[in-house]
Amino acid sequence: MRITMRNIILSVFLFALMGCNNWLDVNPRTEMKEDELLSSEDGYKSALTGVYIQLSLAPLYGCNTSFYFPEMLARTWTIPSSSRSLVDYYLGRWDYKQKDVESLIEKIWKGYYTCIAHLNEILKTVDKDQNLFQNGNYELIKGEALGLRGFLHLELLRMFGPIPGETAANQLAIPYVEELTKDPNKLLTLTYSEVITKIIKDLDEAEQYLKEDPIMAEEDPTDEWQKNRGYRFNYYAVKAAKARYYRWIGNAPKAAQYAQEVIDSKKFALATENDYSSSGGLVMLKEHLFGVHSQNHQSIIEPYFSGSDPLLTQSTNYIQTAYENITGDIRNVTNRYWQSKQSPDYWWITVNYFLKYMDGSDFESPNTIPVLRLAEMYLILTESASQDVAKPYFYQYLIARNVTLSWVDDVADSEKLKARLEKEYRKEFWGEGQMWFWYKRWNYEKFTWPSSFTVPQDGYLIPIPQSQTMFD
């Protein structure tokens, strides 16, 4: 199956210039105007910043690929009636052929590949322009671009590719786009095995280019652009992406290795109860290995989580079941992550809407969406390492979340551990879009929370949009 670049990079996107409000129209279909943008260090910085801005918009992590699309598939939210929200009704039933769901899938697909197209334009010219850069910014820009390209293809593979496992290797997965081209013969959908080979190649190269990332330095960099590395695809984000990658493809030793390297760096720490009295809102900002900042996030999320009739809610009973009725759990403190109100559909039912991303009187939102977070590294390490290694790390995680410490003993039993980690992924990444990928990786045939749901046949195989499959 082949796809066309004409459809992959269809839209005109906006790139932001660093430190000002000027915007530059860039049409990747006609290729970036190198004399206007990629002719200086600042131009490259602006181009890369533009990719981060795209990632923060509603088609991707600003909405669709964080709290919306994968969370609806995981049935994290109460599925509304068709009269209230048609797209949510069908999405909650995994009906990928309904026209509104098809449109949503297409936006996600195009969003990812447009970002990849811009990264490829940067990578096409950055080597020959090395003389433009100072302060190690050539290595940073190339490392970030390579790392992001590998990571975004990993995200696409997890969403659109086959269920990982021994039978996946020769199955068609997704295109791996490494250059801007108008030749459709260069845009083939590759097999799962081919895609994972290319992903790790990009991530390995990115790690080498970022080996002197300022995030590892003890002092702040003098170059202003090199600050706030948590909002960029930094050295530890690459390590975390590799942990996620190896866990996805079933290489437990490698997954444990990279997760442990991130944790043992001591550059990040698990959030505890004390952190809720400081800045960082409800998204556990101190844990972010990589997150995207969305300046307009409050306006994006308003219809979903606030107002008189928020779209995404959950019942009290299901929430307490998910949190196992542990009131001391820092994620289950009353009125912290949830606020109650009367159901718009049933007056006798109380529903709860989600506060994680909302500006509120108690917590000011940083308008940052977590994409890779330290907690995931602890859970990957717990799942992937030997018992002797996993136990002390899982114990640290349980202490930080203020939950039952005896759960650490579940590490000794594979089935108990799987059940425990399922519950922790649900609690930990509520609204972050990770739970559905847990279900897909394990190929669950049935959900038992929040209610019984049998996965449709081929339900984990999200179809590539029709507009992308013009060549057979």
Image: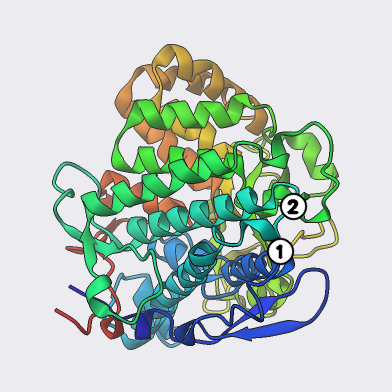
Question: Is the C-beta separation of discs 2 and 1 under 8 Å?
Answer: yes
Q: Is residue 408 left or right of residue 220?
A: left
Query: CA gap, disc 2 to disc 1?
Result: 8 Å
Q: Please provide percent x and percent y for residue 435.
A: 43, 51
Answer left or right for 149 relative to 286.
left
To which quarter of the image does residue 291 belong?
bottom right
The colour mode here is rainbow
> From what the image shows, is residue 163 above or below residue 264?
below
Q: Residue at x 58, y 65 (%)?
A: 351
User: At 45% from the left edge and 59% from the top edge, which residue is drawn?
Assistant: 152
Q: Is residue 411 above or below residue 209?
A: above
Count residues near mark 1 (Cα–Cα under 10 Å), then give few for <14, some for 14-19, many for 20+.
Answer: many
Q: In terms of depth relative to the viewer, which is nearer, 49 or 106?
A: 49
Closer to us: 155 or 195: 195
* Label 1: which secondary element: helix
The residue shown at (28%, 64%) is 174
Tag 1 residue: 41
Q: Secondary structure at mark 2?
A: loop
Q: Label 2: which residue?
A: 134
In the rendered view of the protein, which quadrant contains the N terminus?
bottom left
Residue furthest out toward the top = 388
Query: Quadrant location of residue 67?
Result: bottom right
| Crowding near the residue tagged with mark 2, few <14, some 14–19, many ≥20 C-alpha atoms within 10 Å | few
Q: Position of residue 396 (x, y in %)?
A: 61, 23
Image location of residue 398, percent across then percent down: 59, 27
Which quadrant holds the C terminus?
bottom left
Residue in view at x 17 percent, y 48 percent: 169
Tell me the kind of residue under disc 1: Glu
- 66 or 18, nearer to the observer: 18
Whether residue 231 appears in this view of the structure is: yes
Q: Is residue 331 visible?
A: no
